[in-house]
Image (spheres, rainbow, N blue to C red):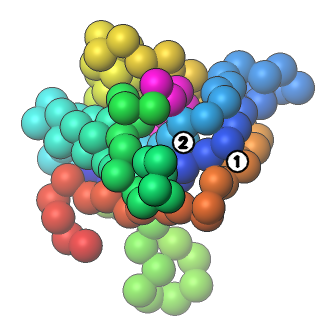
């Protein structure tokens, strides 16, 4: 499982001219799922996301987590995180999970985040989405549950 984690001042997702998910200060996550991902990968990514110390404390040091600052979370499924462009110019998406598995694990992550008491916004799985991100910093972190980077 891969995640692009961005600290945001605000972020929103629009589908068919309707804003379907939006947050203010918090973290925007673009989430990709691969074939062999499981609930363990969900737990790893979610733990990292909510506990990353990427918000400034009173001394302007990145010392606080999403939980510490009472921030919000927006999660958008993005299979293109598993795009492979090592050969040619057209990405291959063979490493992306089939939609059934990807949607199941995406929803599991969203549900577990809500169980932690977070205000969670989402995109719409499989839809064409417009994602507005006001990156704060900018702060962008790449996560991979297999720790390939």
Q: For the magenta stretch, what is the residue range?
A: 70-77
* x 70%, y 47%: residue: 133
Is 132 situated left or right of 28 in this image?
Answer: right
Evaluate whether residue 53 shows in this view: yes
Q: Residues within 10 Å of mark 2 (few under 14, many from 20)?
A: many
Q: Residues within 10 Å of mark 1 (few under 14, many from 20)?
A: some
Viewer-proximal residue among 142 and 9: 9
Q: Is residue 38 above or below residue 59?
A: above
Q: Is residue 140 above or below residue 104?
A: below
Q: Which mark is residue 133?
A: 1
Viewer-proximal residue among 91 and 110: 110
Viewer-proximal residue among 126 and 62: 62
Question: Where residue 68 appears, x then y in whole percent?
Answer: 37, 32
Kindly give the residue lying farthest to the right in the view shown.
Answer: 17
* x 54%, y 49%: residue: 7
Is 44 situated left or right of 83 in this image?
Answer: left
Q: Quadrant of residue 22?
A: top right
Is 75 contained in the magenta span?
Answer: yes
Evaluate whether residue 76 shows in this view: no
Secondary element under disc 1, as helix, strand or loop, is strand
Question: Where residue 102 appears, x then y in whole percent?
Answer: 35, 35
Q: Quadrant of residue 50?
A: top left
* x 36%, y 29%: residue: 67
Q: Which mark is residue 28?
A: 2
Secondary element under disc 2, as helix, strand or loop, is strand
Is 121 situated left or right of 116 in this image?
Answer: right
Kindly give the residue lying farthest to the front in the view shown.
Answer: 59
The quarter of the rendered structure image containing the C terminus is bottom left
Question: Where residue 69 appears, x then y in whole percent?
Answer: 45, 32
Tell me if label 1 and label 2 are in contact, CB under 8 Å: yes
């Amino acid at each position: 499982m891969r995640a692009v984690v961005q600290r945001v001042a605000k972020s929103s997702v629009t589908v068919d001219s309707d804003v379907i998910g939006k947050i203010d200060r918090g973290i925007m996550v673009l989430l990709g799922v691969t074939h062999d991902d499981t609930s363990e990968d969900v737990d790893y990514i979610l733990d990292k996301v909510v506990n990353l110390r990427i918000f400034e404390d009173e001394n302007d040091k990145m010392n606080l987590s999403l939980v510490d600052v009472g921030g919000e979370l927006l999660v958008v499924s993005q299979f293109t995180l598993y795009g492979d462009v090592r050969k040619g110019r057209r990405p291959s998406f063979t490493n992306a999970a089939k939609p059934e598995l990807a949607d199941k694990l995406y929803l599991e992550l969203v549900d577990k985040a809500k169980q932690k008491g977070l205000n969670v916004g989402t995109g719409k799985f499989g839809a064409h989405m417009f994602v507005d991100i006001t990156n704060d910093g900018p702060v962008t972190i790449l996560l991979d549950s297999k720790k390939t980077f």
